[in-house]
Image (cartoon, rainbow, N blue to C red):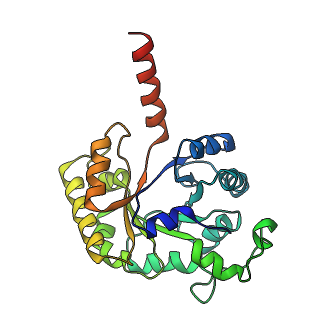
Amino acid sequence: MGQNKTKEKLAKGEAVYGVPMTINAPSLVELLALAGMDFVMLDAEGGPLDPSEVENLARASELTGITPLVRVPVNRPEVIGIFLDRGAHGVVVPKVSSAEEAAAVVRAAKFPPEGNRGFAPARWTITYRGETDLYAAANRETLVICMVEDPVGMAAIGDIASVPGVDAVHIGPNDLALSLGHGANTWHEEVLELVDKAVATVTALGSPFPVMGVGAIPPSQTDRYRAYQEQGVRYFQVALPGLINGATRRFFEAVRA
């Protein structure tokens, strides 16, 4: 499946940035790569993307060197497998609340002996790329990310992060705020306290345990990105609408001044 540049950067302790995408737009994937994004998270949970669309988006990603990840709709092996078979270089699995659920993600994403993913070559260029051991290469390069989005998962985040094969643990503040009764207020004090505690728990595990990720930070709040990097967070998802809206507003503020 080729080298996973995002996974390589994370292994070196570098921060990676990417955007969630809910639309089937290969040209946009190429543009994001040219703009310097490390990965694109093709969202099959929050958006309507299906496996055939992900296949073409993954091709566009490979052509321009950006890592194609897929957020699957559910933590089920047949769902995780089909998106990986279509060319995703990693999976982002929502609503992981226990070590047992995290272990199920790893089993679904990895070929034996590390997991029980089945062989179903949907893309022949992946199958016949020339690796002497396709399965070992896929296990080595596939990025496994568990999303933690509720208080139960936050309490178990150290155990989730300690599951062998989990590369990153990513907090979803939107659903976390909802589950705590704070609606859309991702900056509520209780949410921020839980996030800070989780970041400290995971980063204290040290290498080779997973990196920490935090989402739902507005692109305009670059100080918060820097602050989380200083705390040890290395995986960031940046909202594409916020990037576009911010750039558009700055343009019109300049030309209409």
In the image, taking residue 123 as reference, residue 186 lies left or right, namely left
In the image, taking residue 217 as reference, residue 16 lies left or right, namely right
Provide residue 182's location: percent of width, then percent of height.
26, 48
In the image, taking residue 202 as reference, residue 243 lies left or right, namely right
Q: Is residue 149 visible?
A: no
Q: Is residue 206 visible?
A: yes
Up-down relation of residue 115 to residue 81 (above or below): below
Up-down relation of residue 158 to residue 195 (above or below): below
Q: Quadrant of residue 159?
A: bottom left
Residue closest to the eye, 17 or 50: 17
Check the picture and name the quadrant holding the N terminus: bottom right
Q: Residue at x 25, y 46 (%)?
A: 187
Residue at the far bottom in the pictured view = 113
Q: Residue at x 64, y 82 (%)?
A: 136
Provide residue 212's location: percent of width, then percent of height.
36, 64
Up-down relation of residue 163 to residue 5 (above or below): below
Q: Residue at x 41, y 61 (%)?
A: 14
Provide residue 220's location: percent of width, then percent of height.
35, 36
Counting labels gives 0
Residue closest to the eye, 142 or 254: 254
Provide residue 134's location: percent of width, then percent of height.
71, 79
In the image, taking residue 112 as reference, residue 188 lies left or right, namely left
